[in-house]
Amino acid sequence: PLDRPPASPRSLLPALTDVEDKGSAYHIQMDLPGIPKEKIDIRLNGTLLTVDAQNESAKESEDQTYLRRERSYVGFHRAFELPEPVLSDKVDASYRDGVLDLTVPKARPATEQKIAVS
């Protein structure tokens, strides 16, 4: 029938993602269609970057009759181990038109310094 739910009504999907190495930072773009920005959770633990996002549509009331209902729940999860240490306090995140945009600056490696002997 038309009101049959999709195969998995509470799906957790991998978000389509591009990760680009810009030299001094990683630039990450992630598709999160239909998710309000308040429902996006971004965490960085060392070099592990985790993004979780979820959205539940309005609850169906008893006086509503659907011929077809497919938009009940959508959730996304991605975790990335970044190859180099990053500056977690300098991460920039923005969200527009269903696309999460992250800039994650790399930590500058220690540079060799000459030490004078006195």
Image (tube, rainbow, N blue to C red):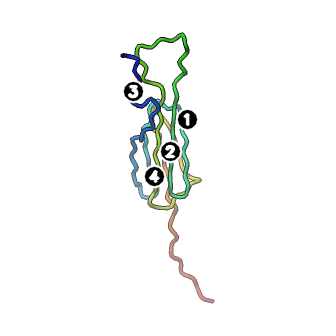
> Element type at marker 3?
loop
Question: How far, Cα to Cα, is label 2 from label 4?
Answer: 9 Å
Residue on which disc 2 sits = 51
Give the number of the disc on residue 80: 4
Does residue 116 lie above or below 34 as drawn? Answer: below
Question: How far, Cα to Cα, is label 1 from label 3?
Answer: 23 Å
> Element type at marker 1?
helix
Give the number of the disc on residue 39: 1
Q: Earlier in the sequence, mark 1 or mark 2?
A: 1
Q: Earlier in the sequence, mark 2 or mark 3?
A: 3
Q: Position of residue 22 (x, y in %)?
A: 41, 54
Indicate the amino acid at tag 2. Answer: Val
Residue on which disc 3 sits = 6
Q: Residue at x 51, y 48 (%)?
A: 50
Q: Residue at x 50, y 67 (%)?
A: 109
Q: Position of residue 10 (x, y in %)?
A: 47, 32
Q: Position of residue 107 (x, y in %)?
A: 52, 61
Question: How far, Cα to Cα, is label 1 from label 2?
Answer: 11 Å
- Give the foreground label among 1 and 3: 3
Circles 3 and 4 in contact, beta carbons < 8 Å = no
Q: Residue at x 54, y 50 (%)?
A: 91
In the image shown, does 104 or 80 lie closer to the viewer? Answer: 80
> Element type at marker 2?
strand
Circles 1 and 4 in contact, beta carbons < 8 Å = no
Question: How far, Cα to Cα, is label 2 from label 3?
Answer: 25 Å
Indicate the amino acid at tag 4. Answer: Phe
Q: Earlier in the sequence, mark 1 or mark 3?
A: 3
